[in-house]
Image (spheres, rainbow, N blue to C red):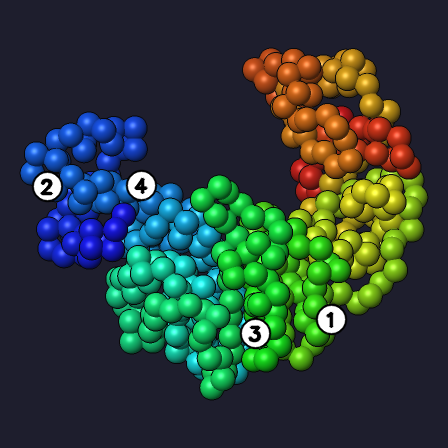
Amino acid sequence: MEPDVFERLLGEEGQALLHEVRDVDPARELEAATKLRREFDADLVSAALAQARFRQRAAAKFDAADAARMYFTPNGLEQATRAPVADHRARRFAELGARRVLDLCCGAGGDALALARAGIQVLAVDRDPLTCAVARANAEALGLADRMEVRCADVTEVATDGWDAVFADPARRTGRGRVFDPEAYSPPLSWAVETARRAPPAALKVAPGIPHEAVPPEAGAEWVSDGGDVKEAVLWFTGSPGEIRATLLPAGRTLTGRGLPDPDVGPVGRFLFEPDGAVIRAHLVAEVAAEVGGRLIDPTIAYVTADAPHRTPYATGYEITDVLPFNVKKLRALLRERGVGVVTVKKRGSAVEPEELRRKLKLDAKAHRGACTIFLTRVAGAPSMLLGHPLGQSGAS
């Protein structure tokens, strides 16, 4: 979409068209487009249908009411920070005393909007004219234009002095897909790090798979999950070098590293704890093991076992009923004997795919009402199957 078409979309005719297409089923877009092009310009129709599609998809990242009023580009939606994650970061900036924040590589404006809603004055910068127009329109649509200025410029040429804090989110996607090399970010991560070093406090959003050895020594690192899914990592230049954190949303609980040694390895006990993905990415499994008085089932597997039940917000607990060598035939016979028709299959350190195992088990959910959680993993290096159920639920054993 060209900037001039987007400008027309913001006008009276474009708004009427957006209202017309807001509930169009994506599967019937062609039919709707053919009909609407008899009355509206073809480019405007295409732009409106694209926005309707983006808004439907955006409901997974943003509040539904916000998503229905916002605007996006394809990359802007793909790279937009999920609203609960952006809100969490905005709260951290507010706690640091930031009242004026410079947002570099702002995209569609998701992070800038969260900062503005937290009462922070924001200058959002991006080099793409259409992206800037989209971010500006989003600020207007959500009533935040008085706290959010959008500037179209090369972020590498923007002065960072005079701001309370700086946030940067270099693009990690190109027209060919996701970029994994930090130096292939746009702009490169090395530029963002140097910028942050000159302008603390600062935060840099990076891919959650960033190696720990790539974290600059003067920065802390935070891995964030939302609803159990790891969403991002952030490098914080806030005067706490080397601090490692895992934050779990929506509860907002944060586990901070204490530099604990790797946990001992021992036999599988009665209880198993599956650490949240952010905890694993942050290398804080030892902290979880200390919380539950546990040990690892294998030196290379992030499952913690213990002999007593514990509640921790940083891991999901299970009561284990069986520890067996991997054998599909014996597993199928055992589940049928116990009347199990529904299984949840989890894997860590196993080459077997959960769907493949389900097919081979050939369970009948109609004939058998029992349920079971199956862990495909390694115990002391040996391929194993652990059977159990979540803590607080009765098993089918």
* Residue under the point 45% across and 74% down: 157
Instruction: Looking at this view, name the residue that lies furthest to the bottom.
Output: 162
Residue at horizontal 69%, vertical 21%?
A: 357
Residue 53 is labelled as 4
Residue 393 locus on image (x, y percent)? 67, 38
| Lower sequence index among marks 3 and 4 | 4
> Helix or strand or loop: what does disc 4 sit on?
helix
Bin the neighbour count of mark 4 within 10 Å (Cα to Cα): few under 14, some 14-19, many 20 and up.
Answer: some
Q: Secondary structure at mark 1?
A: loop
- Tell me residue 226's x, y (percent): 55, 52
Q: CA distance from mark 1 to mark 2?
A: 57 Å
**Front position among marks 1 and 4:** 1
Which numbered disc flags the more N-terminal residue, 3 or 2? Answer: 2
Distance, label 4 to label 2, CA atoms, is 18 Å
Q: Earlier in the sequence, mark 1 or mark 2?
A: 2
Q: Amino acid at mark 3?
A: Thr
Q: Residue at x 16, y 54 (%)?
A: 8
Residue type at mark 4?
Arg
Viewer-nearest of labels 3 and 4?
A: 3
Numbered circle sitting on residue 195: 3
Would residue 380 be visible to someone looking at this image? yes
Residue for badge 1: 217
Q: CA distance from mark 3 to mark 4?
A: 36 Å
- 368 vs 79, left or right, is right
Between disc 4 and disc 2, whose residue precedes?
2
Q: As shown in the figure, which amino acid type bears the numbered disc 1?
A: Pro
Q: Which residue is mark 2?
A: 40
